[in-house]
Image (cartoon, grey):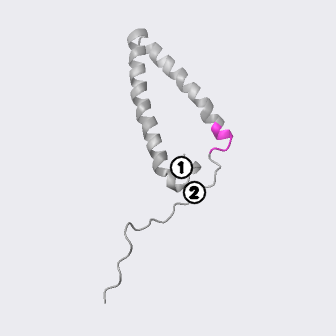
Amino acid sequence: MYSRVSAASYGTVSALWNLAYDGGMGVGAACFGLLAAHLGYAWGFVLTGLLMLGALVPALRDGREGGDDHPPVRAQPARAAFPPRPAQP
C-alpha cells in the first residue's frame, strides 16, 4: 500500500490499514461466532476457509498486474518543527 502513495499519504494509508485490520478481526469473530452457534464449529471453519480462498483471487490478480513493481517512494528528510535558533555570540 505504501508503494502506491506519496510519502505525505503514509498516515492515511496506515489509518486505513489499521481500520480494516481491526474491523475485520471484530466482524470476522462475530460472524464466526454466529456460524458456529447455528451450524457448529466444523461448518464455521469450512465456510471461513472458503471465504479465505475467495480472498486469494484479488490478491493473486494484484500480484500479476505488478502490484509490487511500482518504484519505491523515497521518504523525504524530516523537517524541524521549529526554525533553527540563531547562533549564540
Task: Check disc 1 and report its element: helix, strand or loop.
Answer: helix
- Tell me where residue 13 appears, x and y as whole percent: 49, 46
Residues under labels 2 and 1: Cα distance?
8 Å
Q: Tell me the kind of residue under disc 2.
A: Val
The residue tagged 2 is 73
Specify the quadrant of the image occupied by residue 56: top right
User: Which quarter of the rendered picture does the C terminus lie within?
Assistant: bottom left
Q: Residue at x 55, y 21 (%)?
A: 50
Q: The residue under label 1 is which amino acid type?
A: Tyr
Residue contact at pointers 2 and 1, CB within 8 angstroms? yes
Q: Is residue 58 left or right of residue 10?
A: right
Q: Position of residue 31 (x, y in %)?
A: 42, 20
Residue lying at the far left in this picture: please name it.
89
For label 1, count other residues whose C-alpha is less than 10 Å away and answer few (under 14), some (14-19) or many (20+): some
Indicate the quadrant containing the N terminus: top left, top right, bottom left or bottom right.
top right
As drawn, the label of residue 2 is 1
Is 51 above or below relative to 86?
A: above
* 42 sits left or right of 61 in the view: left
Confirm whether the magenta stretch covers residue 76: no
Residue 23 x/y as whole percent:
42, 32
Give the answer, above or below, for where 31 lies relative to 73: above
In the image, residue 1 above or below residue 37: below
Say if 69 sits above or below 25 in the image: below
Q: Which residues are magenta?
A: 62-67
Residue placed at 37% from the left, 69% from the top? Answer: 82
Residue at point 57% right, 50% down?
3
Q: Badge 2: how crowded within 10 Å, few (<14), some, or many (20+)? A: few
Between 34 and 15, the one nearer to me in the picture:
15
**Residue ranking furthest to the right:** 65
Considering every residue shown, the one lying at the far bottom of the view is 89
The answer to which of 22 and 7 lies nearer the viewer is 7
